[in-house]
Image (cartoon, coloured by chain):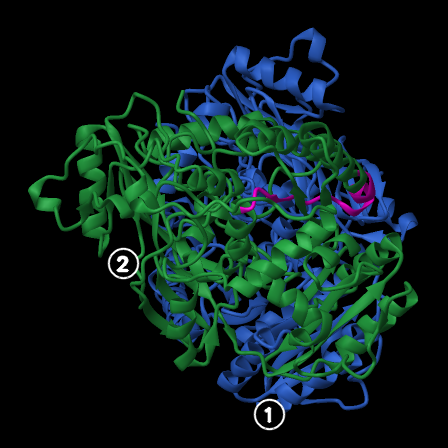
Chain colours: A blue, B green
């Protein structure tokens, strides 16, 4: 299991750098898009020594001293997630509210000891998986009601405890990072195949707590569908659901904790549904010149019962920005995979559907087993994997890059798309005084609607990045909500999406969530500010 | 919309009878199985005049007199569900706790008026869809804390309000019965395709409130997966979720109400995900002589990614009892259907899998479009549709017939199966002094496990049916729970499953459910005795 240090001011490990030539290509590409010569002086990344950290307001008792630490770099690592405003604040050397202590329990008993200690001194506890939140989900900013904040890093709970090859399930500790999880499953010929963009730096528990969206574009899109049972330590109790493939005994207990973002308890283990590793593949990139016809094709695919594993359209603007295309076409990354049987019949019918809607593809590559890793699909895949690393390059050069996502039924999609693109473009222009780039792709598609994902680039005024970002984010979020979308399809709510989440959810459900919070976390220790405020 | 009266003492409409020849065939078949000459005098069904109903303890105010009635037959119709003990009590003319009033609101305003009235006089309110519960879900038996009981019949809220053909969704009132729902969708070329055995006598709201299991043996097995949004009237408020194909904004609000069995609020409307009517079909019945190999084949099918619409094994004993087979083989009803493309490639691979496990089928019929309605599949389908009607014939002849169901991961299935069959057989023998018939089929299958469904026949002592049933039910339920299963996969909890449900669910979830109940139904008006008791 990796024990490399995470970078406190950006994506990845502290010893990982984006190579100079890749940085140069990236900034040159953005400069060309914005028709500017360059971006002036690049801000160097911060160092630990540069940052005068607030002293810890609380101290670990001797009995917990090997679980709780106040190492400055460790406190910095746990100060922010990986959003654009997090990146801006890191490059500004602005870390006013670090956690006072970082806890790293090795088992549930130690975790409970940490919760008990926090309760005894009225410290808040922020559960922390990989820290990849882009919505302020792990930020230890709490009110004066708390004596301090303990961030609860779960990464020592990193083992696959049991594998059931017959049912294809495994009992897995919640703090395991994606690659460590897969490497433990590989000897069994099994895989979770849940590959969010954050895969390398996020944990199973984080995926469950935030309703992470994964590899599969259809059917089992969210981690929700892969959870067989879940074990949660609440400040009151330990809760464990029965391991079942399906049930109809009352409302699902698991669905209460799935998406609870650490406010009701800390997920420590789950039985997860696994896959055998795929043996058969077919995939290609399909080009469309007409966006509406492309969307119709995807809707037909989503409603066909073919269940492609990949079915992700990237609009021409996004294809340009990620260099997965030349901007002349929208690109649909289409793929099937299966461990049991060849998928040619599936791919053949899918290609009939896209052809009926004006899609075009390289006919030599359509059935190639590595179709998902070659050509435009491969270019897109590389861009997808590198994107989180690029934020630090962009921020260092004063370029605002952010994404937001939603879901909407098909019949309202075009209106939502137009309103959101328009509102975001307009806000960028109004706020920064210059046109930006706003693009759209689909991450997941359902029979009744897509999950559109928007990316934008802007050139904010240096020093005003946070305020300008906030204004753009608000405009985009208002447009999303007004057009009927959800404020998040898989990024979660965190602290950043609270204003819109509060308006989106039924008030009766908010009432229940507050009641659940009072019942399970009566002293409101856990992740204050996320999802609900105690009454 | 049908306004025919329901039968108060059995399944179906009051004017429906099981024809004499069908009754004779059925009883002769059971007599042969039990090696008895016959069953003695048949108990005639009860008449309204025979039953001295307790007078209504509460009166409707004049303003609500056209919504609330106390017609004796109507009160009888709403006294019981359709379980075996319900049938026994009906034939015994035992109706000690009928509802005092039956309400039939035509809209939400009238429904709210009924709830307000109930609150004002401290009457309990039992939501009632079609009344097909087999778990005591609609029984108006409440404690002395209540002034009386109003059963809330939802069947006047029976319309499809909006159809969205692009997203294939519809906004539907909760009180619509299955056939009326489908007949309103048919002109749009759409269908919900949710066909529980109770289809003709159950409602959309009932399906959602009880997590009904439907037509599809794989993927979208429960109604849960077909709900796009839901509208609920609670005693405090009206709750409506946003219509979304998917979301990751906090725990799912809909999943709290799905399966809430009327204790948190009354479901009045839902946006439901629909299908186009299937155009392509392939299906056949596959015979296995080895149960273990049959189960292995089904597991392979469930894990293959083929997603058959039907994949239901009926063991040899059950095939005999339902006359879908001669007892020499276990019968797998296997079918694919699709609205977009022929399913031959799917069926071909599925047949390879069953052949590898010793399955045999009629090779001429495997691809026939009507394969699901002919041969053994057709015989099974007919038996499935007629079974609810047969209870009254069996009860009238003193034959105990009941079913119970569960779900379990594959690696524990054989042990659960052996323990449950053994415990139930033993209980029947111990309790009735005679061997019974206990059989098993699968109603739904998941990649990680099946949903086994057990049926049993016994010959109880006349007059002791209820007590003997309770002892057998307890033995079966204890075995289910001890072997790791759920107390119900799709029949719901109601009042009958409470003791096992209370032990199965995590205590933390029970705490939350009680807190939710206090928050949404503070005076505990709704369906007392189901799922939780107020603290």
Location of residue B27 with respect to B525 vertically, above or below:
below
* B50 displayed left or right of B483: left
* B521 or A65, nearer to the observer: B521
Q: Is residue A253 visible?
A: yes
Label 2 resides on the chain identified as: B
* A229 displayed left or right of B330: left
The alpha-carbon separation of the residues under discs 2 and 1 comes to 44 Å
Q: Residue at x 68, y 56 (%)?
A: B29
Q: Residue at x 55, y 19 (%)?
A: A236
Question: Which image quarter: residue B336?
Answer: bottom right
Q: Mark 2 highlights which residue?
A: B156
Is B406 a magenta residue? yes
- Specify start and end residues of the magenta stretch as a single range: B397-415
The numbered mark at residue A356 is: 1
Circle 1 Cα neighbour tier, 10 Å, few/some/many (<14 / 14–19 / ≥20): few
Location of residue A499 with respect to B288 vertically, above or below:
above
Q: Is residue B238 visible?
A: no
Question: Which image quarter: residue B95?
Answer: top left
Q: Position of residue A185 (x, y in %)?
A: 85, 47
């Amino acid at each position: 299991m990796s024990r490399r240090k995470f970078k406190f001011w950006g994506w990845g490990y502290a010893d990982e750098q984006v190579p100079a030539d890749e940085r140069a290509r990236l900034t040159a590409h953005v400069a060309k898009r914005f028709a500017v010569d360059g971006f002036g002086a690049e801000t160097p990344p911060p160092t630990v020594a540069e940052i005068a950290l607030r002293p810890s307001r609380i101290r670990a008792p001797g009995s917990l001293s090997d679980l709780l630490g106040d190492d400055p770099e460790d406190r910095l690592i746990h100060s922010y997630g990986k959003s654009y405003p997090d990146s801006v604040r890191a490059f500004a050397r602005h870390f006013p509210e670090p956690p006072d202590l970082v806890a790293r329990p090795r088992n549930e008993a130690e975790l409970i000891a940490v919760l008990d200690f926090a309760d005894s001194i009225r410290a808040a506890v922020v559960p922390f998986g990989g820290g990849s939140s882009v919505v302020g989900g792990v930020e230890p900013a709490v009110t004066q009601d708390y004596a301090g904040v303990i961030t609860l890093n779960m990464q020592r709970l990193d083992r696959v405890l049991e594998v059931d090859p017959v049912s294809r399930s495994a009992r897995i500790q919640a703090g395991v990072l994606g690659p460590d999880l897969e490497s433990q499953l590989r000897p069994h010929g099994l895989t979770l195949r849940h590959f969010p963009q954050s895969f390398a730096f996020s944990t199973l528990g984080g995926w469950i707590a935030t309703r992470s969206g994964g590899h599969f574009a259809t059917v089992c899109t969210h981690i929700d569908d892969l959870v067989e049972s879940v074990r949660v330590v609440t400040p009151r109790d330990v809760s464990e659901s029965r391991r079942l493939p399906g049930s109809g005994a009352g409302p699902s207990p698991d669905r209460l904790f799935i998406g609870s973002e650490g406010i009701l308890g800390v997920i420590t283990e789950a039985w997860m549904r696994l896959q055998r590793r795929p043996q058969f593949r077919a995939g290609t990139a399909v080009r469309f010149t007409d966006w509406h016809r492309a969307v119709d094709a995807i809707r037909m695919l989503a409603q066909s019962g073919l269940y492609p594993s990949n079915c992700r359209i990237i609009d021409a603007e996004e294809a340009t920005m990620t260099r997965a295309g030349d901007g002349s076409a929208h690109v649909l990354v289409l793929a099937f995979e299966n461990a049991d049987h060849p998928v040619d019949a599936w791919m053949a019918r899918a290609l009939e559907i896209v052809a009926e809607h004006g899609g075009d593809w390289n006919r030599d590559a359509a059935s190639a087993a590595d179709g998902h890793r070659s050509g435009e699909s491969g270019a897109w895949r590389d861009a997808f994997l590198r994107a989180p690393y690029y934020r630090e390059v962009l921020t260092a050069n004063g370029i605002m890059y952010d994404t937001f996502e939603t879901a909407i039924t098909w019949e309202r999609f075009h209106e939502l798309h137009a309103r959101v693109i328009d509102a975001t473009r307009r806000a960028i222009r109004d706020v920064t005084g210059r046109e930006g780039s706003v693009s759209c792709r689909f991450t997941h598609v359902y029979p009744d609607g897509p999950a559109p994902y928007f990316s934008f680039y802007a050139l904010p005024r240096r020093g005003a990045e946070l305020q300008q970002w906030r204004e753009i984010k608000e405009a985009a979020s208002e447009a999303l909500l007004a057009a009927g979308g959800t404020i998040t399809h898989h990024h979660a709510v965190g602290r950043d999406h609270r204003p819109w989440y509060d308006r989106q959810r039924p008030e009766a459900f908010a009432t229940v969530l507050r009641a659940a919070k009072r019942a399970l976390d009566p002293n409101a220790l856990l992740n204050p500010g996320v999802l609900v405020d105690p009454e």
